[in-house]
Image: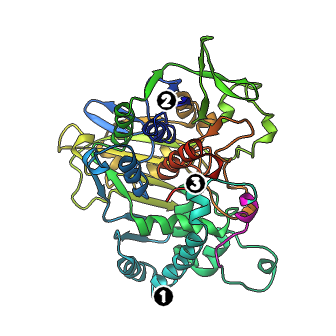
């Protein structure tokens, strides 16, 4: 039995802790805040309740596997998880288009596209997502299910999206996602593709075409909501950790990774206390540790990506019942920007049936940097929003940084192939033996599902050693 110290109690860190505890290790999680879940938070006021982090889960199989591998009770007995259908509503007011897409129906999506965007739109959309499927199939295992090994960064730096080639500049370099959208979809339909990717905090103008795997993933595997709010998923993972005898120490900020005999030997806390360990798992962005405390030069890490944005979020308490026709997720598009409006049909989010809780979020930018700008766009999705508004709370990137410690409130996107490896995250192993990286700032990147995948990868590397080839 090894002593393992885990820094942070985010989703990736807890997924790692649960798997290591099942393997027989003594695991202690040190969290700077007062609760678990990292960005998967909850805000409650006057009977209203809001998710302050991710509002939906894609690839639920990641957490199903976690619960199967760590206990007798499957995920479905621990949370009430439902697939969202319709999947999403897109509003493009500057084009006069309002289209709702069904879930788990490729043909239904194509039909809705044809009706909203004109003849051939569904065929063009399915063709793009078909090429995205090829990119997914080509990179799924090395990008998501295997440790990032030497040489993988080079091979994954090539864009796997089989974009249609034309003459000119695009013959000399792979196209960006924005160029693919314009060339293969065109007009308003292109904005749907770029908008989905922009929602992950990725700029379509610089993203590789392989970013099309993100809308492919959503459409293929669906969008899932946990009744009671996504915080309930974090609670279920936390309780699974407790069942496996994982110890949590809250209010314990780690200031340094201790090193002895050339390997990680524990952690030093902000109060000066030390905790010895045989292995250390860093489940936060390593740069949250003070300068000079890293066991390797800071320039030895792949770039964190200081352009990774945070999000601005409005939590809206509305009078009046949620209409029966309301869609759980609506994306309102504007030139170069968008907002996402969440309207869960969940009694746990509101004081009674005569009120509604709505969450509006966006990556700050032109047209979405101020709360009033977000409200203006959200009104396109929620009829009579301002007249119904009782009160609202604003959460800025600075608020997110204060709550989670993430510099600038940054929310890491999933790792992507292409762009010369620029959108890959650091490997789960480090130059210091005994120190591993987990969570959204490590391979395979951010998002609920991707962060959870680090649990299988890091636990496999620790338990099986360098011969571990990946999850099955």
Q: Which mark is residue 414?
A: 3
- Quarter assignment of residue 105: bottom left
x and y, in percent, of residue 53 in the image = 45, 42
Q: Is mark 1 in CB contact (under 8 Å) with mark 2?
A: no
Give the structural element (helix, strand or loop) at label 2. strand
Q: Identify which residue, 223 or 421, lies in the foreground.
A: 421
Q: Which mark is residue 120?
A: 1
Q: Which residue is mark 2?
A: 27
Q: Main secondary structure of the magenta part?
A: loop
User: Is 48 located above or below residue 382 in the figure?
Assistant: above
Most extreme residue toward the top is 272
Q: Is residue 302 shown to the viewer in this render?
A: yes
Separation (CA) of disc 3 from disc 1: 31 Å
Q: Identify which residue, 290 or 353, lies in the foreground.
A: 290
Residue at figure coordinates x 43%, y 58% from the top left: 59
* Magenta stretch in the rendered image: 152-162
Question: What's the coloring here?
Answer: rainbow
């Amino acid at each position: 039995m090894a002593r393992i110290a885990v820094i942070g109690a985010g989703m990736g860190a807890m997924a790692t802790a649960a798997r290591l505890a099942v393997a027989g290790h003594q695991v202690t999680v040190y969290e700077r805040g007062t609760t678990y879940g990292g960005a998967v938070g909850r805000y409650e006021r006057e009977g209203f309740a809001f998710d302050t982090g991710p509002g939906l889960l894609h690839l639920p199989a990641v957490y199903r596997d976690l619960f199967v591998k760590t206990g007798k009770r499957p995920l479905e007995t621990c949370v009430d998880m439902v697939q969202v259908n319709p999947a999403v509503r897109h509003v493009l007011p500057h084009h006069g288009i309002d289209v709702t897409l069904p879930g788990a129906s490729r043909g239904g999506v194509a039909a809705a596209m044809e009706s909203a965007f004109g003849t051939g739109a569904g065929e063009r959309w399915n063709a793009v997502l078909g090429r995205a499927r090829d990119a997914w199939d080509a990179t799924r295992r090395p990008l998501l299910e295997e440790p990032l090994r030497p040489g993988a960064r080079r091979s994954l730096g090539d864009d796997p999206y089989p974009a249609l080639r034309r003459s000119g500049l695009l013959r000399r370099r792979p196209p960006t996602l924005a160029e693919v959208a314009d060339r293969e979809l065109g007009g308003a339909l292109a904005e749907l593709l770029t908008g989905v990717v922009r929602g992950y905090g990725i700029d379509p103008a610089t993203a590789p075409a392989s970013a099309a795997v993100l809308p492919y993933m959503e459409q293929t595997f669906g969008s899932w909501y946990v009744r009671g709010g996504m915080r309930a998923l974090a609670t279920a993972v936390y309780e699974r950790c407790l069942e496996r005898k994982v110890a949590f120490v809250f209010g314990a900020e780690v200031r340094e990774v201790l090193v002895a005999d050339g390997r990680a030997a524990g952690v030093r806390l902000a109060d000066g206390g030390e905790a010895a360990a045989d292995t250390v798992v860093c489940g936060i962005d390593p740069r949250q540790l003070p300068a000079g405390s890293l066991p390797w030069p800071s320039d030895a890490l792949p770039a964190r990506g200081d352009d990774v944005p945070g999000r601005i979020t409005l939590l809206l308490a509305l009078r009046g019942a949620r209409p029966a026709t309301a869609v759980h997720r609506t994306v309102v598009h504007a030139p170069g920007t968008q907002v996402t409006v969440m309207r869960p049909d969940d009694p746990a989010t509101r004081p009674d049936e005569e009120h509604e809780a709505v969450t509006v979020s966006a990556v700050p930018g032109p047209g979405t940097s101020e709360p009033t700008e977000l409200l203006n766009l959200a009104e396109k999705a929620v009829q009579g929003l301002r007249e119904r508004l009782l009160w609202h709370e604003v959460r800025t990137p600075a608020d997110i940084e204060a709550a989670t410690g993430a510099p600038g409130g940054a929310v890491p996107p999933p790792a992507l192939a292409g762009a010369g490896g620029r959108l890959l995250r650091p490997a789960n192993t480090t130059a210091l033996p005994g120190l591993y990286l987990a969570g959204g700032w490590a391979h395979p990147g951010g998002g609920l599902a991707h962060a959870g995948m680090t649990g299988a990868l890091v636990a496999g590397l620790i338990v099986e050693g360098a011969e571990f080839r990946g999850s099955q």
